[in-house]
Image (cartoon, grey):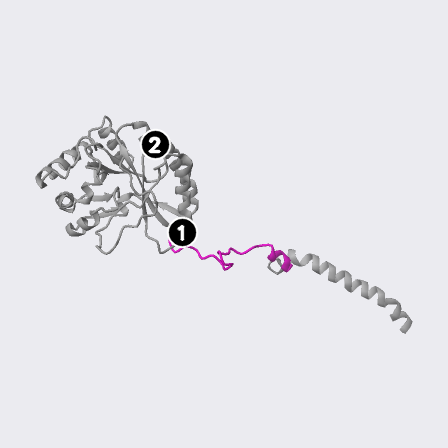
């Protein structure tokens, strides 16, 4: 009896090993969630800069892109309107295509601003163009001129300054202008052509809805530089940051860079909003933030 049992021991051991191997092979199929641990180790967790899991942003970053100097060339406007984003446009008065451009922009559901010429520091060497406001004007002349300029740019819901470094430094001249804009339920965007702008102070004094430019995207009129500024916005992602306002111009390099950067920005959680979404009644204590070092543009 013992001999017969001993002869069967090797067979029993082989059978046990075979069952164990078969179970090991079938386990990932029968119970996938209990598969070999090494399969789980192949999935790397999302980590932040310090090796900790990256949190999901509390909200999307928001930016507004305002294109100045519209009115000379309709082809550039149409290319920008083809970009899948709610860009905003500032139209100069008394240009050959001012009215037509404003109408096309409005028909595409985009925001129209009057790009109001104002006196620069270098005047009269540098002239701001027809329809400009000057510091030599009195309050009645200022309001009369801005009313005439608004007739040249239909559908305008706000105004920003074209040039204007000297005019924007004169609070006494800004107050009657801003009162007129408030009465018309318009808002003002300070292009920040001077670091000494009194725009925020005058807006506070008059209760005018107001926003301030933070970045010029095309001072160099170079595709690579403009594209780099735009895609670099993805590095600013933080739920606590305020929306930012960028200004560009209808240069071919800017049109191409804005168009090409849009898919990248959207993929990285950057939301493009109309400039009207950024305006508010400003608190005097809130200072405008300059993000881009090249802050002055007297174009």
Q: Which quadrant would residue 9 be assigned to in this image?
A: bottom right
Percent across and percent down for residue 205 are: 15, 52
Neighbour tally class for label 2: few under 14, some 14-19, many 20 plus, Cα within 10 Å: some
Of residue 25 and residue 64, the one placed in the foreground of this image is 64
Mark 1 and mark 2 lie on one chain; the one further toward the N terminus is 1
Q: Image height check: is 55 above or below 148?
A: below
The total of numbered circles placed on residues is 2
* Label of residue 251 in the image: 2
Q: Nearer the viewer, mark 1 or mark 2?
A: 2
Is 165 placed left or right of 273 in the picture? left
Q: Which quadrant would residue 65 be assigned to in this image?
A: top left
For the magenta stretch, what is the residue range? 36-59
Is 233 placed left or right of 68 in the picture? right
Quarter of the figure with the N terminus: bottom right
User: Does dot 1 land on a helix, a strand or a loop?
Assistant: loop
Quarter of the figure with the C terminus: top left
* Label of residue 237 in the image: 1
Task: Identify the residue at image location x=56%, y=55%.
Answer: 44
Distance from disc 1 to disc 2, alpha carbons, whole Å, reads: 28 Å
* Predominant secondary structure, magenta span: loop
């Amino acid at each position: 009896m013992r001999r017969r049992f001993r002869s069967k021991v090797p067979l029993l051991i082989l059978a046990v090993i075979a069952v164990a191997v078969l179970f090991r092979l079938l386990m990932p199929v029968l119970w996938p969630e209990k598969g070999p641990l090494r399969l789980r180790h192949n999935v790397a967790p999302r980590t932040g800069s310090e090796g900790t899991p990256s949190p999901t942003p509390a909200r999307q970053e928001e930016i507004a892109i305002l294109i100045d100097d519209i009115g000379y060339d309709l082809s550039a406007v149409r290319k920008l309107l083809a970009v899948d984003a709610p860009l905003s446009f500032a139209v100069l008065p008394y240009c050959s295509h001012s009215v037509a451009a404003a109408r096309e922009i409005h028909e595409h559901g985009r925001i129209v601003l009057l790009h109001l010429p104002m006196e620069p520091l270098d005047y009269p060497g540098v002239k701001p163009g027809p329809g400009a406001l000057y510091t030599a004007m009195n309050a009645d002349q200022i309001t009369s001129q801005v009313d005439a300029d608004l007739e040249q740019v239909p559908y305008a819901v706000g105004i920003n300054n074209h040039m204007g470094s000297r005019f924007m430094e004169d609070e006494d001249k800004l107050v009657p202008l801003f009162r007129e804009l408030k009465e018309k339920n318009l808002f003002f965007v300070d292009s920040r052509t001077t670091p000494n702008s009194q725009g925020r102070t005058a807006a506070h004094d008059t209760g005018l809805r107001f926003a301030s430019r933070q970045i010029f995207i095309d001072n160099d009129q170079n595709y690579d530089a403009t594209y780099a500024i735009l895609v670099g916005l993805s590095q600013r992602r933080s739920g606590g940051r305020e929306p930012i306002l960028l200004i560009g111009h209808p240069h071919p390099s800017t049109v191409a860079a804005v168009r090409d950067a849009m898919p990248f920005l959207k993929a990285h959680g950057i939301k493009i909003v109309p400039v009207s979404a950024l305006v508010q009644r400003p608190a005097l204590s809130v200072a405008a933030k300059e993000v881009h070092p090249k802050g002055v543009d007297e174009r």
